[in-house]
Amino acid sequence: MFGKGNKGQSDRKSGIEEQQGRSELSNRAEPKYSHPKILLLDMGDEVEAALREAGYAVSVGSFGRPYKVPRCDELEPVIINGAFPRNFSEQEIIVIDLEPAEPLDGPEGEKHTSPGEDDWWASVLSAVI
């Protein structure tokens, strides 16, 4: 029923773009079934459309897309590009696509904390964060 689409870089949006684009869908009329509340993470638009059409309460989000970095033996701060809905903890069913998307050419945005603050860091040995 829900086939996997092409996950090429040109066909995938960033997590933030997906969340912004889907927020328009979230403002539709009330779903036929208020329960179970379903959270889709990094799933295709066709899955969301099918569940909404069937009358389910659906929220969407993304862990974000990986991005390329120069390969070296150091750590780099993680630049977050995902987005979760505000009510993600209230969802009853969570569906996640764990297949990694094609990496972006670089990070979108900037480091979220000042240089002296604690932050998330990742190895760049694989040249992808």
Image (cartoon, rainbow, N blue to C red):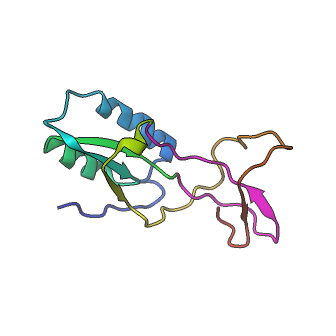
Residue 16 coordinates in the image, percent (x, y): 50, 41
Q: Quadrant of the C terminus?
A: bottom right
Q: Residue at x 30, y 49 (%)?
A: 92
* Residue 67 lies in the magenta stretch: yes
Q: Which residues are magenta?
A: 64-85
- Dominant SS type (magenta): loop
* Residue 30 lies in the magenta stretch: no
Residue 28 coordinates in the image, percent (x, y): 24, 28
87 sits to left or right of 5: right
Q: Residue at x 71, y 40 (%)?
A: 112
Q: Residue at x 51, y 62 (%)?
A: 102
Q: Quadrant of the N terminus?
A: bottom left
Q: Could you say which quadrant of the image residue 88 lies in?
A: top left
Residue 119 coordinates in the image, percent (x, y): 74, 50
Q: Residue at x 37, y 33 (%)?
A: 23
**Label total for image:** 0
